[in-house]
Image (spheres, grey):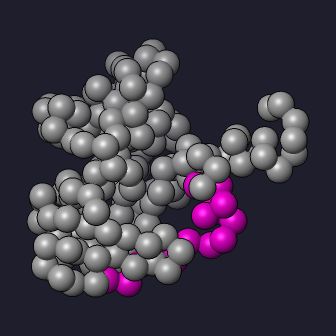
Amino acid sequence: MARVWIFGDDVSTDDIIAGRYLVSRTPEELGKHVMENLDPEFASKVGKGDVIVAGKNFGCGSSREQAPVALKGAGIGAIIAESFARIFYRNSVNQGLPVLICKGVRSRFREGDEVEYDLERGIVKNLTSGEEIQAEPLPAFIISILRAGGLIPYLKSKSGQRL
């Protein structure tokens, strides 16, 4: 069970982590400034495992992989959106941040609602309203990458080599 934070359409990677913070090197440092352009207090309010529910085209803009790193550094456990910019989607998977595409999800939640999600079955439950929504289930290979903590740990586990 996690708390929901609501964002709208076209949240860009610059909205997620402003360019001026890209010199920060750790996820925790980046996480202190996540979503600052949209909500200056967000990083201080979000809790470990909380979930962002958003509209269309989440993660549009530049291909900076620091955006999902910053979200993870702030404690975000997953993002459920109506659609994602493709590069952000893949960067999130590569960084071990779960992302679910769920048509109409933005209108089914209010900020502060409690949510549960099942990545393999693509089930999203609004525990506050009792509503269950069908998202796009994640393929097995993406689940494997996420369970490993991201692409690099996944590849290390498969190769037995240091990468």
Give 67 or 144, whichever is nearer the viewer.
144
Q: Is 134 a magenta residue?
A: yes
Q: Is residue 94 left or right of residue 84?
A: right
Q: Is residue 156 left or right of residue 102?
A: right
Residue found at the very far top of the displayed protein: 23
- Asked where in the image residue 42 lies, by quadrant, the reply is top left
- Quarter of the image with the C terminus is top right
Q: Residue at x 41, y 40 (%)?
A: 72
- Asked where in the image residue 35 lies, by quadrant, the reply is top left
Q: Is residue 23 left or right of residue 154?
A: left
Q: Residue at x 16, y 38 (%)?
A: 45
Residue 37 visible in the current orientation: no
Q: Residue at x 48, y 50 (%)?
A: 97
Q: Is 74 a magenta residue?
A: no
Residue segment shown in magenta: 133-146
Give 21 or 114, whichever is nearer the viewer.
114
Q: Is residue 1 above or below residue 156?
A: below
Q: Is residue 100 above or below residue 129?
A: above
**Where residue 120 sits in the image (x, y, percent)?**
53, 75
